[in-house]
């Protein structure tokens, strides 16, 4: 990004995306209210009043435009396949917007997500391996594709309380940008991650408890796709430990919840309120308190990701420490749920 001094470029990206998203969300919110595009509370909701849904239009629009601008300025140094990935993200946003307006079939959504993931994987350089050569080329791409597809969906599943998706985006994006400062990731990729941070911060102004607007699938699905691409790109650059550590809480909560539901025969594809963070809210924590607890867990995960990629010998200790951090967060969320259940239990 040679036309800007090193400190100026990230500041421009961060402020421009934050202010643009905040302003555009205000415009989108007015349109959503006018058209009465609302998320009405039901038995699976964590909110109590009808709330406009679809604010993710602003987040994705700003993030895609910012990534395009970064790619143009970066020129040959732009991330491999950037334009294909952004095109796929835009297609996912369009499909998800239709799903927000009128529910589409799960098979159609999955088919388009698979196509988007396949297009993104085709953009990776053939000499770059997500799993560092542990798998043959075809195995590397198949397993990476399945994980990417799962991440897209878990990011959507986890967007169930005010502020949680924005806070997680900030954590992942900030962690990836810090890897640029220690020389692990190329600056253009880090600036795109920082654009995600700015877009998330701008949206959080409207989405923090009490939320005035929700992301909707139009925001959570393509945002999960873009964050998944950034994490895969980091892994192909050698930062595989950071790619595991930064989204570790989201991965653990969503995966453990799905496994728990599958083991008792519940329909894993149906909406529910069984994630650790949802049960903590049901147990008495506010949305803001729950998200602050998750943020408190994400902070050491960011530090561990930087440590892991600063010195190769620290990777496994950092991963072990990260696992303990995630277990502690899940334990605290589960404890809040248990205390709430005990308070609600009838006395004999």
Image (cartoon, rainbow, N blue to C red):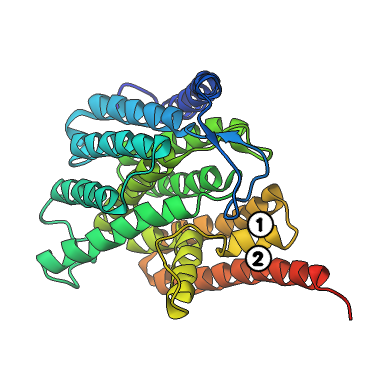
- Is residue 307 at all visible to an observer of this figure? no
Instruction: Identify the mark at residue 146; answer none if there is no mark.
Output: none
Residue 138 is situated, as x and y percent measured from the top left of the image, at 11, 65
**Residue at disc 1, secondary structure:** helix
Nearest the eye: 118 or 49: 49
Residue at 54% of width from left, 19% of height from top?
34
Let me know if residue 199 appears in the view. yes
Residue 160: image location, x then y, percent: 55, 50
Q: How many marks?
A: 2
Q: Nearer the viewer, residue 304 or 88?
A: 88
Q: Give the camera-side residue of 47 and 196.
A: 47
The answer to whether mark 1 and mark 2 are in CB contact below 8 A is: yes
**Mark 1 or 2, which is nearer the eye?**
2
Of the 4 image quadrants, the one containing the C terminus is bottom right
Residue 108 higher or lower than 218, as above or below: below
Whether 338 is drawn above or below 119: the answer is below
Q: Residues within 10 Å of mark 1 (few under 14, many from 20)?
A: some
Image coords of residue 75 (percent x, y): 20, 28
Relative image position of residue 23 (x, y in whole percent): 53, 19
Q: Residue at x 49, y 31 (%)?
A: 55
Residue at (51% x, 68% y) in the render: 322
- Mark-to-mark CA distance, 1 and 2: 8 Å
Q: Disc 2 on helix, strand or loop? A: helix
Q: Which residue is mark 1?
A: 293
Above or below residue 30? Residue 335 is: below
The furthest residue to the right: 348
In the rendering, which numbered label is found on residue 333? 2
Residue 343 falls in which quadrant of the image?
bottom right
């Amino acid at each position: 990004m040679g036309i800007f001094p090193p400190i100026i470029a990230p500041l421009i990206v961060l402020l421009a995306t934050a202010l643009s998203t905040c302003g555009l969300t205000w415009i989108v919110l007015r349109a959503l209210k006018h058209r009465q595009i609302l998320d009405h509370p039901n038995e699976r909701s964590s909110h109590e009043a009808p709330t406009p849904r679809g604010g993710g239009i602003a987040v994705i629009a700003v993030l895609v435009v910012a990534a395009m601008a970064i790619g143009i300025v970066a020129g040959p140094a732009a991330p491999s396949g950037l334009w294909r990935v952004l095109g796929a993200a835009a297609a996912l946003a369009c499909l998800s917007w239709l799903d927000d307006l009128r529910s589409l079939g799960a098979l159609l959504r999955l088919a388009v997500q698979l196509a988007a993931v396949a297009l993104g994987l085709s953009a990776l350089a053939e000499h770059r391996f997500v799993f560092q050569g542990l798998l043959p080329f075809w195995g590397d791409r198949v397993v990476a594709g399945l994980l990417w597809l799962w991440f897209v969906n878990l990011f959507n599943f986890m967007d169930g309380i005010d502020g949680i998706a924005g806070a997680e985006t900030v954590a992942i994006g900030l962690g990836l940008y810090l890897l640029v400062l220690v020389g692990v990731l190329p600056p253009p990729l880090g600036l795109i991650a920082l654009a995600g941070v700015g877009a998330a911060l701008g949206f959080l102004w409207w989405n923090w408890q009490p939320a005035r607007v929700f992301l909707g699938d139009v925001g959570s699905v393509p945002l999960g796709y873009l964050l998944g691409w950034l994490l895969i790109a980091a892994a192909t650059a050698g930062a595989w430990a950071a790619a595991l550590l930064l989204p570790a809480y989201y991965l653990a909560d969503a995966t453990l919840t799905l496994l728990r539901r599958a083991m008792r025969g519940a329909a894993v594809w149906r909406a529910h309120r069984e994630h650790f963070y949802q049960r903590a809210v049901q147990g008495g924590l506010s949305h803001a308190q729950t998200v602050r607890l998750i943020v408190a867990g994400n902070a050491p995960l960011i530090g561990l990701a930087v440590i892991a990629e600063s010195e190769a010998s620290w990777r496994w200790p950092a991963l072990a420490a990260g696992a303990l951090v995630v277990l502690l967060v899940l334990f605290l969320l589960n404890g809040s749920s248990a205390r709430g259940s005990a308070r609600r239990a009838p006395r004999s």
